[in-house]
């Protein structure tokens, strides 16, 4: 059990990591993920070449891309790992200040309409990436205090999830975000690495800077560093083991 995108136990985003000799049947992995009941449970199997196959399950579904459980898996494996996943090959390596850097595919956003009422918010942009919708709102304070209608979000978004973001409101934080994915069994995810595949490019375009720091303003909260490198995004964060079961 690892808390990702944090230095401190009991914050960031918790993930369960299981390293196995081979993959069990899919229904067994799905049952384990439901039993553990975290936003993601990761299953890693070493390949003959020293790389790993990696799969992620929410309590409701297997997903194509997950950042925090990849970070947690790399942490368990010592900080350096190369994962083969449904979302492509993901390389992890130690970064500065004790972080782990993960090489992920960029997920650019394009303008798209979303019929969702956000009382009190000024919406500046609505768009969609490969996996998620993204809404930018004008006020980070509104975003931090936002109490979502999860049913309305589930009905409005056919995508995996909804990213709501705003410009940063604290020193050293370039943007804040929250992430909701009720259609895959996650009402609100504490810190979502894969959402930053979209957030990185969006805020790089807005700010003109390739390297940025985001804060996901869930109840647990977590800091995510991002850096655009061509059609890839380097996502960096800390991780801490909470328990070994």
Image (cartoon, helix red, strand yellow):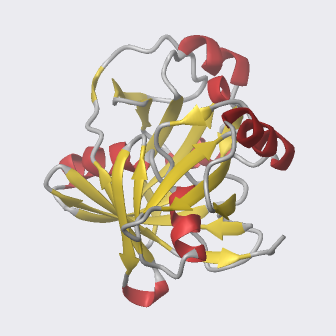
Q: Quadrant of the N terminus?
A: bottom right
- Which residue is found at the position 37% from the left and 86% from the top? 96
Q: Determine the residue positioned at 51% across, 70% down.
A: 74
Number of labelled discs? 0
Residue 52 against residue 237 in the figure, above or below: above
Q: Position of residue 146 (x, y in %)?
A: 65, 38
Residue 134: image quadrant is top left
Name the spot of residue 189 as percent of width and height, x first: 64, 45
Is 49 left or right of 183, judged from the image as shown?
left
Query: Would you identify the image quadrant in which residue 22 lies?
Result: bottom right
* Residue 190 visible (yes or no): no
Q: Residue 5's x, y, as percent?
A: 56, 67
Question: Residue 90 location, x and y as percent?
Answer: 36, 58
Q: Dividing the image into 4 quarters, which one contains the C terminus?
A: bottom right
Q: Residue 227 versus residue 105: which sits nearer the camera? A: 105
Q: Nearer the viewer, residue 239 or 219?
A: 239
The residue shown at (26%, 37%) is 108
204 relative to 1 in the view: left or right:
left
In the displayed structure, 159 sits above or below 137; it is: above
Residue 11 in view, yes or no:
yes
Please identify the residue farthest to the front as the structure is shown.
48
Which residue lies at the image location 55% right of the left edge and 59% below the top edge? 45
Q: Nearer the viewer, residue 195 or 67?
A: 67
């Amino acid at each position: 059990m690892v808390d990702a995108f944090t230095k401190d136990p009991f914050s960031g985003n918790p993930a369960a990591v299981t390293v196995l000799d081979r993959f069990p049947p899919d229904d067994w992995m799905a049952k384990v993920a439901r039993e553990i009941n975290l936003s993601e449970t990761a299953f890693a199997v070493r390949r003959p070449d020293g790389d790993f196959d990696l799969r992620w399950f929410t309590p409701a579904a297997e997903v194509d891309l997950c950042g925090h459980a990849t970070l947690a898996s790399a942490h368990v494996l010592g900080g350096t790992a190369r994962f083969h996943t449904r979302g492509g090959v993901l390389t992890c390596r130690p970064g500065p200040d004790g972080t782990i850097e993960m090489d992920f595919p960029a997920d650019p956003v394009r303008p798209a309409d979303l019929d969702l009422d956000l009382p009190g918010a000024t919406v500046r942009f609505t768009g969609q990436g490969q996996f998620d919708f993204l809404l930018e709102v004008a006020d980070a304070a509104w975003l931090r205090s936002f109490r979502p209608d999860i049913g309305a979000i589930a009905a409005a978004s056919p995508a995996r999830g909804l990213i709501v973001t705003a410009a940063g409101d604290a020193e050293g934080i370039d943007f804040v975000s929250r992430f909701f994915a009720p259609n895959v069994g996650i009402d609100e995810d504490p810190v979502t690495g894969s959402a930053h595949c979209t957030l990185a490019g969006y805020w790089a375009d807005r700010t003109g800077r390739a390297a940025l720091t985001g804060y996901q303003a869930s109840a647990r909260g977590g800091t995510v560093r991002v850096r655009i490198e061509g059609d890839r995004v380097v996502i960096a964060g800390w991780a801490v083991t909470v328990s070994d079961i």
